[in-house]
């Protein structure tokens, strides 16, 4: 090893420590900057009308995004109805039946790949199977694309949560003569209840801010929806359209919608993370 | 293999904690029939995941067939993008995807490593977890919020301060030529870096924490400084994991859509300067998909998507194999 004077080594050490502390500050600085701008710019756009009125044409003051708020909630809810049961059942397979088998590890691998697939590609996929053949955009297609994004996330968190339940619980229930499905739903699920719930909440937080998969599935609409069969208004695509428009009023509405989405997503994420962390400590 | 076993229920005295739990009873009894059904329902849901990936490839290939037939391999190397003349090529989008990702990696990798070093080695673990959690929050912020912030706040800042500065110190470098407009390749790369930073930081922090404490202590015992321990022990021990973290970030950056679409400027020209507008595969799709009225136009866009799918799946598989190899080496279950 090359000999270096101790003063130089100490200096280098102090320098690197300083740089790494500065890097952490940089990360926190950008987080704070983004949060601050969205809150400041968004808060001025929020009013009662924002939540109750339909979008106004450009140049006309007032107007709100009531239809988009409802559309986002409905599509997310439908995505949860599709994605969560399938995801939980898939996770049950991995943890209770598949375990270390070839099929199970293939499925695990596939969920990782699906999680890493860009959400816009999922949008193109749903366009190809649900919009192109039918001939028009629909809220259902939007919900399905969100469900596809949710599915692998729910599968993996379910598996992780169920694996934390001690095997002795399963064994004692089986020894009492309970069938496997009853053991799973009434014993294992009860043990993993809070973990499953937080996993689902995190998945919801993740998809409710998604824009790319909705661009060519749900599209957007300035009207109240009659059903989910037609183009459906939603907050994220509205943000995109309004932000790209030259109208100041619309851009202000986009900031309001951004604040709404960000506040929702971050609060759900923070609460579930804190909860998970507190539980892991016990 | 648990799937094929049909042995009687395990006894209360069976060793607990053993995976490979047999199903409860033979299929003839009514209780067994319920369980067989239950198992098949779970199998069907789980198999949906690989089927979806298969479906992705099949449907995207199917829809891009007209473009594949019409352009052939020329599509990948041609820089044309002319909806009026029905002439399309993917080169500028592929170029933009790779360059913006490269910028993001060049910024985020060292920054993520430095932050992980700070969180794990320098401050008390409690603080480390709080700051680490805050940085991970960056990953929870939806892409479109990064886009809004990037377009209305960050891009003007880049145009007023950062780009003129780079142009001054860059001199005649082709990278920093052209008017400082704010939006463009560089801004997109910086925002991408912020978006993948939390992934890189959290994986590298985990890797740093996995380094055996004895190794570090013995280095300290020989009189090493904190930095020397990090460079010669931690970095070397955790090298594989850090590469894996890089792969994860890479996968994210390649497919990131909304934030990039807001700030990259959406131009189909390839330019050496990072100040000019560019595009990525994802941003082209987001901008033009709903406007593509002509079948060949639409099919070309889908083919772009197919290329992106191949790239990201390739990167994802590579990273998982890499991480799996690493975990096997350290004797842990994946």
Image (spheres, grey):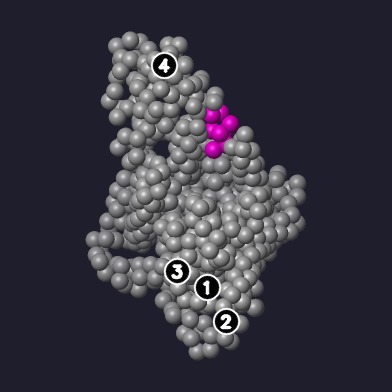
Disc 1 to disc 4, how far (Cα)? Answer: 64 Å
Task: Say which residue label 4 marks.
Answer: B13
- The first of marks 2 and 1 along the sequence is 2
The residue sitting at 35% across, 35% down in the picture is A100
Q: Which of the chains bears the disc numbered 1? A: B
Task: Say which residue label 1 marks.
Answer: B186
Give the answer, above or below, for where B254 lies relative to A116. Answer: below
Q: Are marks 2 and 1 on the same chain?
A: yes
Disc 2 to disc 4, how far (Cα)? Answer: 72 Å
Q: Nearer the viewer, mark 3 or mark 4?
A: 4
User: Badge 4: how crowded within 10 Å, few (<14), some, or many (20+)?
Assistant: few
Task: Say which residue label 2 marks.
Answer: B166
Task: Say which residue label 3 marks.
Answer: B102
**x and y, in percent, of residue B201 in the image:** 54, 57
Residue A176 is tagged as: none
Residue A279: in sight, yes or no?
yes
User: Badge 2: how crowded within 10 Å, few (<14), some, or many (20+)?
Assistant: some
Disc 1 to disc 3, how far (Cα)? Answer: 10 Å
| A198 within the magenta span | yes
Secondary structure at badge 3 equals helix
Closer-to-camera residue (A62/B319)? B319
Q: Nearer the viewer, mark 2 or mark 1?
A: 2
């Amino acid at each position: 090893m090359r000999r270096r004077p101790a003063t130089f080594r100490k200096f280098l050490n102090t320098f690197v420590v300083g740089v790494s502390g500065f890097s952490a500050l940089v990360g926190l600085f950008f987080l704070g900057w983004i949060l601050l701008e969205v809150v400041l710019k968004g808060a001025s756009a929020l009013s009662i009308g924002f939540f109750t009125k339909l979008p106004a044409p450009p140049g006309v003051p007032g107007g709100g995004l009531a239809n988009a708020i409802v559309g986002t909630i409905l599509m997310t809810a439908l995505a949860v109805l599709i994605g969560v049961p399938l995801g939980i059942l898939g996770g049950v397979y991995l943890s209770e039946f598949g375990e270390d088998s070839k099929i199970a590890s293939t499925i695990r691998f596939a969920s990782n790949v699906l999680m890493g697939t860009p959400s816009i590609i999922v949008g193109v996929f749903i366009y190809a199977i649900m919009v192109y053949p039918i001939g028009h955009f629909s809220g259902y297609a939007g919900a399905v694309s969100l469900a596809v994004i949710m599915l692998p996330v729910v599968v993996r968190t379910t598996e992780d949560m169920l694996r934390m339940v001690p095997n002795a619980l399963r064994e004692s229930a089986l020894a009492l003569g309970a069938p496997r499905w009853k053991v799973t739903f009434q014993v294992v699920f009860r043990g993993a209840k809070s973990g499953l719930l937080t996993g689902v909440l995190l998945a919801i937080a993740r998809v409710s801010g998604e824009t790319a998969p909705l661009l060519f599935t749900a599209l957007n609409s300035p009207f109240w929806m009659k059903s989910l069969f037609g183009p459906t208004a939603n907050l994220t695509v509205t943000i995109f359209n309004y932000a790209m428009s030259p109208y100041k009023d619309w851009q202000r509405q986009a900031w309001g919608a951004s604040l709404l989405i960000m506040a929702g997503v971050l609060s759900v994420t923070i609460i579930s993370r804190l909860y998970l962390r507190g539980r892991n400590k016990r | 293999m648990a799937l094929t076993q049909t042995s009687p229920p395990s006894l209360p005295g069976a060793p607990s904690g053993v995976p490979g739990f047999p199903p409860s009873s033979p299929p003839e009894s009514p209780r067994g029939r319920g369980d067989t059904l239950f198992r098949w329902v779970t199998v069907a849901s789980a198999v949906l995941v690989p089927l979806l990936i298969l479906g992705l490839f099949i449907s995207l290939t199917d829809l891009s067939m007209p473009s594949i037939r019409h352009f052939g391999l020329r599509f990948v190397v041609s820089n044309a993008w002319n909806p009026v003349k029905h002439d399309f090529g993917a080169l500028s989008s592929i170029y933009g995807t790779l360059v913006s990702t490269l910028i993001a990696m060049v910024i985020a990798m060292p920054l993520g490593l430095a932050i992980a070093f700070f969180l794990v080695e320098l401050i008390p673990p409690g603080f480390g977890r709080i700051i680490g959690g805050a940085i991970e929050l960056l990953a929870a912020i939806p892409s479109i919020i990064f886009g809004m912030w990037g377009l209305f706040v960050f891009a003007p800042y880049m145009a007023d301060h950062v780009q003129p500065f780079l142009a001054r110190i860059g001199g005649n470098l082709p990278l920093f030529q052209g008017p400082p407009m704010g939006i463009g390749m560089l801004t997109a790369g910086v925002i991408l870096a912020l978006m993948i930073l939390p992934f890189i930081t959290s994986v590298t922090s985990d890797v740093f924490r996995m380094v055996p404490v004895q190794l570090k202590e013995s280095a300290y015992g020989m009189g090493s400084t904190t930095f020397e321990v990090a460079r010669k022990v931690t970095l070397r021990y955790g090298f594989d994991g850090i590469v894996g973290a890089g792969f994860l970030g890479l996968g994210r950056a390649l497919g990131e859509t909304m934030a990039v679409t807001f700030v990259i400027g959406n131009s189909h020209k390839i330019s050496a300067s990072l100040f000019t507008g560019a595009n990525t595969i994802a941003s082209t799709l987001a901008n033009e998909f709903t406007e593509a009225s002509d079948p060949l136009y639409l099919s070309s866009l889908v083919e772009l998507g197919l290329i992106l799918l191949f790239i990201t799946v390739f990167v994802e598989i590579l990273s998982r194999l890499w991480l799996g190899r690493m975990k096997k080496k350290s004797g842990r279950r994946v």
